[in-house]
Amino acid sequence: MNQAIKRNEKRFPADFMFQLSAVELSDWKSQNVISNKEKVGLRKLPYAFTEQGVAMLSSVLNS
């Protein structure tokens, strides 16, 4: 998914998605039951998508 986003950056303007900050990620992790609270299997901060961003991501991943 990260590669698809990187290859199509122009299709994802700032109001379609954003990357969570370290504080937001920490808050998100504290609200979920996860097995490894330190890494959560993530190497990068995750992206959050607006409704339009999800639609664009869907079309990018389907192509």
Image (tube, rainbow, N blue to C red):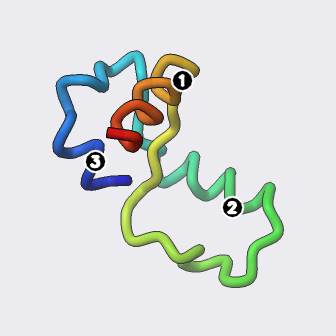
Q: Which amino acid, by three-letter code, is at mark 3? A: Ala
Give how far apart the Cα atoms at labels 2 and 3 are: 25 Å
Q: Earlier in the sequence, mark 2 or mark 1?
A: 2
Give how far apart the Cα atoms at labels 2 and 1 are: 20 Å
Q: Which residue is mark 1?
A: 50
User: Which is more foreground, mark 2 or mark 3?
Assistant: 3
> Residue visible at 61% across and 58% down?
26
Q: Earlier in the sequence, mark 3 or mark 1?
A: 3
Numbered disc 3: secondary structure: helix
Label 2 Cα neighbours within 10 Å, binned few <14 / some 14-19 / many ≥20: some
Q: Which residue is mark 2?
A: 29
Label 1 Cα neighbours within 10 Å, binned few <14 / some 14-19 / many ≥20: few
Q: Position of residue 37 (x, y in %)?
A: 67, 77
Against 17, residue 34 (above or below) is: below
Against 11, residue 34 (above or below) is: below
Q: For residue 61, which quarter of the picture? A: top left
Q: Which residue is mark 3?
A: 4
Q: Which amino acid, by three-letter code, is at mark 1? A: Thr
Q: Earlier in the sequence, mark 2 or mark 3?
A: 3
Report whether 32 appears left or right of 43. Answer: right
